Image (cartoon, coloured by chain):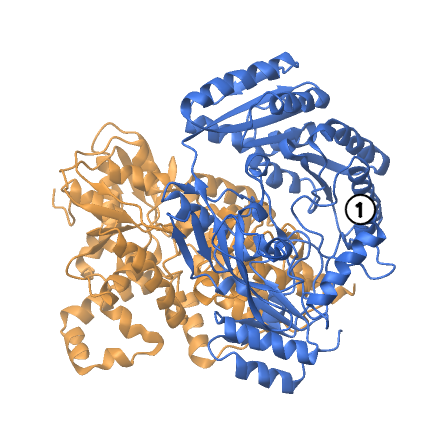
Amino acid sequence: MRRKVLTAEHLTQIQAIVATGRVLTDESDLFSYSFDGSFGTYLPDAVVQTKSVDELAALVKLANREKIPVYPRGQSTSLSGGPLPVKGGMVFDLSVMNDVLEVYEEDLVAVVSPGVLTAAIHKAAEQRGLMYPPDPSSSHVSTIGGNLAENSGGPKGLKYGVTKDYVIGLEVITPEGEIIQTGGRTVKNVTGYDLTKLIVGSEGTLGIITKAILRLIPKPQQTATMMAIFDSLVDAGSAISKILSSGILPSKMELMDQASIVAVEQYEPLGLPTDAAALILIEMDGHPLALKAETEQAAALCQAVGAREVRIAKDKKEEAELWKARKLVSPAIVRIKPTKISEDATVPRSKIPQMCERLQEIRETYKIHLVVFGHAGDGNLHPNIICDKTDEEEMRRVEQAVTAIFKAAIELGGTLSGEHGIGTMKAPFMEMELGAAGLDMMRRIKHAWDPNEIMNPGKIFPVPGQKLELS
Amino acid sequence: MDSTQKQLREELLYDKTNNCVQCGYCLPVCPTYVAFGKETHSPRGRINLVKMVGEGRITNLSVLEEPFDYCLGCRACETACPTGVEYGAILEATRAAIVRRKRFTVPVRILRKSMLKKVFPSRKMMNLTGDAMWLYEKSGLKKALRTSGITKALPFHLGAFESIVPPPVSPAERKRAPGEVKARRAKQFTIAFFTGCIMDAMFHRINQLSIRLLSEAGCDVIVVQNQTCCGALHAHSGEMEEAKELAKRNIEAFEKVNADYIVNNAGGCGAMKVEYGHLLASEEEWAERAKAFSAKSKDISQILALCDLPPFNPREERVTYQRSCHMTNVQKVSKEPIDLLKRVPGIQFVEMDQAEMCCGSAGIYNIVHYDASMQILDEKMQHAKATDAAIIITTNPGCLLQMKLGVEREGLSQSVRVLHLIEYLAEAAGISVPDEN
């Protein structure tokens, strides 16, 4: 068992600082903050819950002085290990900071504390006819703090961009315990380096976000949904390219391959054709008249490249039915085998057909159960490997397959991670994408911010010789 | 892995925990996570603790005791779970494993022994309980004790509940209850009625109204002899062997009549009955019979929804519905009660926010974890109050009492009524019992 980082003396000091919150140290509590949605169990020495930014800053000062690792955590839905306390120390449970959610309609901004659920922001904006577009599928569970730290995406990334495109200001506790403000309440702001964008997506390695100013936009009046079914993946890929180059920008474009269609049909029959090679789901939003014209145009384009069938939803109910297929993919595939490795390698849009072919080869070479679905419109596929983590031999093959997926994405001009983050598992592949010098620049930034390496250590940067291990 | 570890894994249903991918979708729907604010009191946290025991990282089972003890067992997490984790099964197995290794404090032991093993399963004892309640009220003892303040000093905060129990039924009225009632309009179904133990002792009139309403709706109703407690309270407390015994007695009793459905009016009992199939799956002689019993088990709202109902008088009032968790999450019945309410002309039905959240009653949870339960209830009451409804409908005796307590705690007893769905429908149809016709 790992040696404790915290001494009894530390604990007394921590308890003295946390005057308005709780410090959890029971065994059941430590185990309950030892995991996230990815792999591994790492026990912290203490879990701190407080709404007070001053108390948190004082704790970080103590941690920096005593070299105690600190891990900011939201609701721990991370798929990359972001909140895992890999080196012991203190977990800060920021999900308790959930009470600031102010919408300023005239400025088109929202000010939020990090523990607010992303879905609560969606709701608050919508009540005022506005929209906060980033929509990770976990948004009803995940906190905005976690979304900011990981720069989360979602299906709407295609048209609206991702979390970083909607953050204009932050309040951050630096790894040395100072409270700083970055950016502000204006969309235009070029005063100095853009620290806001540096912090967003830094996976909690550069500081703790304690407040954020988010940009909102007017909510589109209506949505329209269609499903196009194809006999070949390449046709589906060309349909996507054709639509995107025709002047139409859908709000979502989701792809399901044959393996995911079959899995869904076996799980809950929806009347999807299991012999089809792929289907794409397209959602458009905007003015009703524009929507009508664009839907017809998109349907015609799909048919022109050889769609076997195009279904257009007539009302909200039919829209929900079409989307149900996509929603059921995740539950359906885990029925096959218990362990799900969800990757998010992303390629330029035009390379989707090639990426699909490479994935096909990887599936056969390593004899793995690979299901491909995801946000095809922005090149962010989710190849999911369905396996059994208790089968060591299988897991070795899975490790090789994951490595091959990363390699394929980078060779096609893409990236390791579109939206889940690097965390612990993808760290060994950083140099492959960034090169030695590129990675070194990142290390230097990390060192300048966090000289004592206390802020979420063990993430993003590989230790020499680190390899992917899934069991 | 040594054999004790392997055995422990089997005992805790460790294999089922591997279906949890730790996505956290259960967090926002878990009343204890929301109320107590830590992962340790969430379904994902609890499942992880079982995993850790199975993997030998937690060696002392008592580490799991508090988190599992405080679970309401509402199973809202199962409805939210995208991967179909059988949380209820893991919960019951873990509780049973803890109970096997634990010595309870004396008052808890007495409560468990006397209530779970002697009182609930015994028709005689439950009738006696009902009669004692009647005597307590009629003899003036209730008034005397209330005046003296003794009720406030009862253990387990029982005094708090004393003021909300329904008016009891006299022993004579209880004896008059019919064993069989014919359909009062063109016959649709033959129903075997499941009275339930607490329903029958404390809510005898709701049972009688249920039977009347079923007959008015075109059902022959048979009150099956020798039926017993459903065993839900036993299963939820980790007393699995007792629960199985009760299930077998009920299966035998109901096999003696030839009915289309076995119907009850308590969400918690209904949930237990639909799980008999699971409960007895490994017992050769019983598996098929249990499955058949479960398949026939329905909530009364499901049957009434299929029938023509007697005409309702118009009601100009706002009504909200506090769902029974077990009815929603285990029986998967959530639409029918609302559809039935909407059949009453003039009614304004308002859904409360977070309607799917447990009220904190949860069997005997509000007795053994009074403070935690009240914290959850007070949260619930804020949402109930926000609907501005004059009537709160429930479909389970525990919820009925708990919501009455909530109304009392909020000082709303004068303006808000809490009723079982059946009481409300009967009232709207102008049906009352005892009925001399």
Amino acid under disc 1: Glu
The single residue placed furthest to the right in the displayed view is A465
Give the chain letter for orange.
B
Which quadrant holds residue B263? top left
Tell me if residue A457 can be seen: no
Give the chain letter for blue.
A
Residues A415 and B430: in front is A415
Name the spot of residue A237 as percent of width and height, x first.
Answer: 69, 24
Q: Describe residue B402's horizontal placement relative to residue B69 as left or right.
A: left
Tell me if residue B26 can be seen: yes
Residues B226 and B415: in front is B415
Residue at x-position 59% and y-position 66%: B97
Q: Quadrant of the C terminus of chain A?
A: bottom right
Residue at x-position 63% and y-position 12%: A304
**Label 1 chain ID:** A
Which quadrant holds residue A196? bottom right
Q: Quadrant of the N terminus of chain A?
A: bottom right
Instruction: Return the residue at label 1.
Output: A433
Which quadrant holds residue B331? top left
The single residue placed furthest to the left in the displayed view is B436
Q: Residues within 10 Å of mark 1 (few under 14, many from 20)?
A: some
The single residue placed furthest to the front in the displayed view is A191
Residue at x-position 46% and y-position 52%: B76
Q: Secondary structure at mark 1?
A: helix
Name the spot of residue A149 as percent of width and height, x first.
Answer: 61, 56
Residues B249 and A453: in front is A453
Where is B41 relative to A268, above or below? below
Where is B265 relative to A235, above or below? below
Name the spot of residue B432 as percent of width and height, x first.
Answer: 15, 47
Name the spot of residue B145 as percent of width and height, x first.
Answer: 19, 78
